[in-house]
Image (spheres, rainbow, N blue to C red):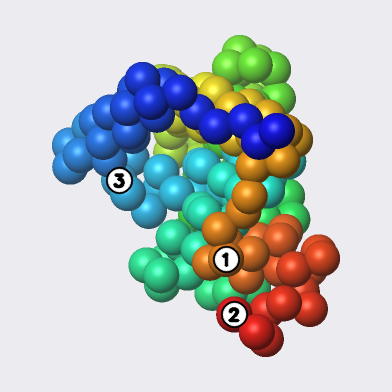
Amino acid sequence: MILILSLQLFRTFLSINDVLSKEGAFEYIGPIEREVINTVTSAINNCEICLSFHTSSLARQKAMSSEDIALLAAGGLPDNKYTNLAIAAKYANAHKGILLEREKAHLAELGFNLDHQYEVTFLVGQMTANNYVFASLINEGAPVEDGLKKMGPFKDTVYKALKEEM
């Protein structure tokens, strides 16, 4: 039996995503920064479907090289202007949103004031919630869309042989 989201949960998910995607939703984080945070968080949480979606988005937006996107998807740090943001997202993930004093100090050195740190932490939490739902759906046998099979961790799994056919 394939588990699907209830219609109301799906509407709520879309509504939250719409609000978070609006211009000006955050003071310090724009759409590409949000995708970086989502990719880092999805890699940490091992959510293949979300990771595939967000790496695909970064690729479409030409936000960074495919090598840097692959590094993020593998849990590494890109060598570009988003390195510090990836570090901030990793810190926010490390202790369930609690930033240690040394991490706050390091982030301040990297240019993140306290409000910026809270925005990162908020988005990490939102993405973690999404990861939990979608990882659960995959675990219950929900199908993965063909487009996502080509990106992120899916590209090197059982779908690799199908890539040429898609």
Residue 80, horizontal then vertical, whole percent: 53, 64
Circle 1 residue: 146
Under circle 3, the secondary element is: loop
Q: Callout 3: few (<14), some (14-19), or many (20+) C-alpha neighbours within 10 Å? A: some
- Alpha carbon distance from label 3 to label 1: 28 Å
Q: What residue occupies the far bottom of the structure in this picture? A: 164
Residue at the spot 67% in from the left edge and 86% down from the top edge: 164
- Residue that label 3 marks: 30
Measuring from the top left, give residue 81's x and y in whole percent.
47, 59
Mark 2–mark 1 CB contact (< 8 Å): yes
Q: What residue appears at the point 70 percent right and 25 percent down from the top-left corner?
A: 94
Say whether disc 3 or disc 1 marks the residue closer to the N-terminus.
3
The amino acid on which the numbered mark 1 sits, given as a three-letter code, is: Asp
> Which residue sits furthest front?
1
Tag shown at residue 166: 2
Regarding mark 1 in the picture, which secondary structure is present there? helix
Q: Amino acid at mark 3?
A: Gly
Q: On residue 96, which mark appears?
A: none
- Residue 12 visible in rendering: yes
Q: Amino acid at mark 2?
A: Met
Residue 122: x and y in percent read 44, 22
Q: Residues within 10 Å of mark 1 (few under 14, many from 20)?
A: few
**Can you say whether 80 is above or below 100 in the image?**
below
Residue at 33% from the left image edge and 33% from the top image edge: 14
Q: Residues within 10 Å of mark 2 (few under 14, many from 20)?
A: few
- Residue 83 lies, with reference to residue 45, above or below; the image says below
Point out the frontmost of discs 3 and 1. Answer: 1
Looking at the image, which residue is at 20% across and 39% down?
22
